[in-house]
Image (cartoon, helix red, strand yellow):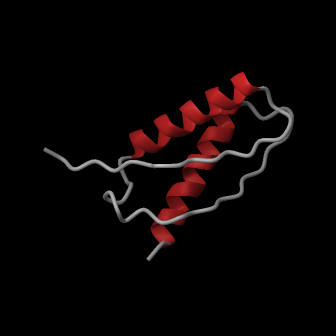
Amino acid sequence: MAASASIDHLVLEVPGGSADAGRELALLVAAGLGEAGALPQAGDLPTLRVLVTGDAHTDNATLAHRIVAATLRGLALAP
């Protein structure tokens, strides 16, 4: 059985969106990180801050993809 990792706390600061859009984005990011299968084992997860950009025309799926990619890049650089 494979060990699993979990994220205890995920904060997304997205100005100007609705609560429903924020929940949708969070679920997309969580799904993307889960599908990546590249997270460190539990206890090895660092505190990580990533910055991604978008504008009023950036859809949640695109923004989630950017967040997942930036998170995975950040985790790869973490000691």
27 and 66: which is toward the camera: 27
Residue 15 in the image: above or below residue 39 = above
Q: Position of residue 36 (x, y in %)?
A: 41, 45
Residue 50 horizontal/vertical position (percent): 65, 59
Task: Place residue 61 in its image quadrant.
Answer: top right
Residue that protrudes farthest toward the front in the picture: 8
- Horizontally, residue 12 falls left or right of residue 3, namely right
Residue 78 picture location, percent across and down: 48, 72
Q: Which residue is rendered at x = 63% and y = 47% of the image?
A: 11
Q: Quadrant of the C terminus?
A: bottom left
Residue 26 left/right relative to 52:
left
Report whether 67 appears left or right of 39. Answer: right
Question: Residue 54 occupies which quadrant of the picture?
Answer: top right
Quadrant of the rendering where the N terminus is positioned: top left
Q: Position of residue 27 (x, y in %)?
A: 55, 31
Q: Residue furthest top?
A: 20
Q: Quadrant of residue 60?
A: top right
